[in-house]
Image (cartoon, rainbow, N blue to C red):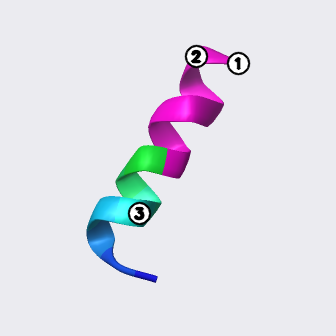
């Protein structure tokens, strides 16, 4: 996993 992927997942979790 790259930082971009982690950031993307975190962003999605935040919106949820």
| SS label for mark 3 | helix
Looking at the image, which residue sits at the far bottom?
Answer: 1
| SS label for mark 2 | helix
Label annotation for residue 5: 3
Magenta residues, dominant SS class: helix
In which quadrant of the rendered view does residue 5 lie?
bottom left
Above or below, 3 relative to 6 = below
Label annotation for residue 8: none
Q: Are marks 1 and 3 in contact (CB under 8 Å)?
A: no
Looking at the image, which residue sits at the far right?
Answer: 16
Q: Is residue 11 left or right of residue 13?
A: left
CA separation, marks 2 and 1?
Answer: 4 Å
Residue at the disc numbered 2: 15
| SS label for mark 1 | loop
CA separation, marks 1 and 3?
Answer: 17 Å
In which quadrant of the rendered view does residue 2 lie?
bottom left
Residue at the disc numbered 1: 16
How many numbered dots are placed on residues in this image? 3
Residue 14 position within the rendered picture, expressed as x and y whole percent measured from the top left: 56, 25
For the point 51% across and 44% down, which residue is it?
10
Image: magenta residue range? 9-16
What crowding class fits label 3: few (fewer than 14 Cα within 10 Å), some (14-19), or many (20 or more)?
few
Q: Are marks 2 and 1 in contact (CB under 8 Å)?
A: yes
Residue 11 position within the rendered picture, expressed as x and y whole percent measured from the top left: 46, 34
Above or below, 12 relative to 2 = above
**First in sequence: mark 1 or mark 3?**
3
**First in sequence: mark 2 or mark 3?**
3
């Amino acid at each position: 996993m790259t930082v971009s992927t982690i950031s993307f997942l975190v962003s999605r979790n935040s919106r949820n």
